Amino acid sequence: MKGILSGLGITIGHFVGKKVTRFYPYEKREMPPRTRGLIKLVRNEETGNFNCEACLFCEKICPPQCITIRYQQATDYRPRPFLAPNGVWGNFKRPVRSLLSNEGRPEKYAEQEPLSTDEAAQVEGILSEARGREDLFGTLQKIQAAIGYLPRATIEQLAESTSVPLSDVYSAATSQGEFRLAPAASDIVLCQCPACYLGGMTAVATAIRRELGQAARDILREEIVCASGECLDTCSLAPVLKVDGQTYAGVTPQQARQIVREKVLGRGDRQ
Amino acid sequence: MSPNPKEKERHESLPPSQSANTSRASSPRSPLGDKKLIMQRWGENDPASIDDYLARDGYSALRFAVKEMKPFEVIEEVAKVRLRGRGGAGFPVAEKWEIAAAVAKAPKVIIANAYGADPSAAGDRALLERNPHQLIEGLAIAAYAVGAERGYIYCRSNLAQALGRLQQALQQAKERGLVGEGVFGTHGFTISIVPAPVAFVNGEETALLAVIEGTRPMPRQRPPYPAEIGLWGLPTVINNAETLANLPPLIRDRGKEFGAVGSEKTKGTKLLTLQGRLASNGLVEVPFGMTLRRVIDSVAGGTRQGATLKAVQVGGPIGGCLPVDLLDTPLDYETLAEVGATVGSGSLLALDRETCMVDFARFRLTYLQNEACGRCIPGRLGTNRINGILEAIVSGLGKKGDLELLEELAAGVRESSLCGLCALATQPLLTTLKYFRDDYVAHVEEKRCPTGKCTPVRTEAFRRNKVL
């Protein structure tokens, strides 16, 4: 009874209240401040550039995926301070590139060298077989296996040909440690299973980091990827490390330093 | 980690310790003898031939289930013997199936998780290499029980041999009409293989869905559970490959042999990977309810010569470290959870006196922090801070109050992480803090390592520059 009366109270209140009918085309409703009726790119009045920063969030969040954004880079990357925090000893998975001095880096990232005709043909073949989302990771793996990294142009081509948004392809390509976005000059993989740990991997890893840290400034324009990888499957020969596809077993810290000096840093001596 | 033609050669010329397809004199002896369930026909069979599998009663369980049993009877059969998921959490399989079978939406999807996120656990990989048909048959039985039409086998892309065997086996099963159109009378069942990239988080069940859907693999919020809304919004059952491999022997004799082994709460067996300082390392099948001490003494043959056991880590990277006086804990989901370990991936790592437990916790946390997907803050920053403090302690830079801070951080990460991986990532830390506190105290207060084995991983200059 009480419920019915209180409900009727609201109805009766509307009988005597203000009228709410609006004559739409003549009277327009006042919109809430954050309404975005029609999306349009707005220019900054002072500089004349678009305010959009191509963060691709709208493309990512759009439920029916009706937004597609194409963009190009307007400025260079910002210089990064030497010995930037986070990139040095803390996170080993990150490439050693943050140790390198800043010269010569921006243009390498902005414009990667075009692929050779042979490589381009291989990529073409892989892209023609790509089916889209369902084998996105498989396609990226094939490209990586064929040419050793995922060039930006190829990622854009892949997004174009499979109509998967570029931001999604990019987020898949950056989610896995095995994908490289730039060619690696050298590839050091340290086994990470407990057997190698018990065999003394910590000392080996520390030695390698020291060796790279001392010499990394001498290698410009080259990247060394040093990652703690999967188990390399040779547990009775621990500790194991793999440098450019070659496996070294039972390594001592001194040997590791020497391997890095000869195989990895030996390449950086070119003038 | 691209598939490399040399990989296979190298694999075959390997010494026996880890490699999955070896059974030499030094491999551990299973306490079950001839009564093994999962590994029943391994070793004597030819994994590359379907005729061989058929000659050994293969696919008879599937035929029996489809011809003689209704789907709900299969679920009842599994509920009767209380089969629990072997993926780590031990959720009852029948309950999961019932939820999915009750959802009216179609088609339904079933996924076999043969990923084996722990790189050093050999169970899933050995199953694919040594008896792939067993997995296909188990998957088909499960699909019949829940009424699924699409099946996926989710495995690692870097294991060339396992992947090759699986593809070959699936091709053979298709040719014989065991999977495909109309195999269950009213509807068909198709299987596809998903080779996934390699990362620890990719084995988590919702991250697994993201990989198949072709998006960035990150776990997502549950509920809704995948059994209701899963792959592309369809009801999806995700079972571990080892769970499914239990089904053919279970249905074949209607659970008699299966119900006879195991503990009170968990029936059946578990594939354990024995590693570390044991007399024999490798894959072995042991019944649930066996104490860890018996596993080490009678199955593995004790510790390696000259090594004294200090701790055992059960359950892979996210498992807890148990001291010697807790070795009488039986191998079971509840009993291990009580003392802070998990069944997890089924790896059992023995550590000897030479191992510093602080450094070991640091080693595990470094791995888990690198592999954290970064979606939730506790997982991304919490594990990073824990790792940073542990690095400092190992390098002799520990401060008073560090241990309390570690406990506080670990409790926070455990409570508030999005998925089990980062919540359980604190287990190696919490168990070593609890059972081996003396090691930590010696590092922090006396600046010395009791084993003398710790290698400094940081310098004083670094600590001044970076506050962790």
Image (cartoon, coloured by chain):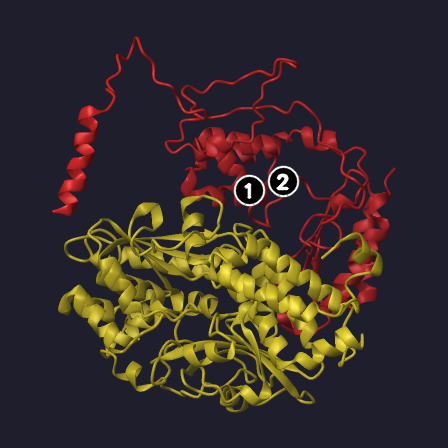
Chain colours: A red, B yellow
Is B416 above or below relative to B212? below
Pick the residue in front: B458 or A235: B458
Q: Position of residue B392 (x, y in %)?
A: 75, 64
- The front one of B198 and A174 is A174
Q: Which residue is mark 1?
A: A173
Query: Mark 1: which secondary structure?
Result: helix
Q: Chain of mark 1?
A: A
- Residue type at the position of mark 2: Leu
User: Between B128 and B80, which is closer to the camera in this rendering?
Assistant: B80
Residue B177 coordinates in the image, percent (x, y): 24, 57
Task: Please report the residue visible at 80 percent of the width from the left and 66 percent of the height from the top.
Answer: A253
Does residue B403 lie above or below B102 as drawn?
Answer: below
Question: In the rendered structure, which disc, 1 or 2, sits on the residue that comes first in sequence?
Answer: 1
> What residue is pinned by disc 2?
A181
Which dot marks residue B405?
none
Answer yes or no: do the residues labelled 1 and 2 have beta carbons within 8 Å? yes
The three-letter code of the residue at mark 1 reads: Ala
Q: Total marks drawn?
A: 2
Q: Is residue B117 visible?
A: no
When asked about the image quadrant of residue A77, the answer is top right
Q: Is residue B412 left or right of residue B401?
A: left
Q: Callout 2: helix, strand or loop?
A: loop
Could you tell me which residue is drawn at 40 percent across and 83 percent down? B287
For disc 2, the chain is A
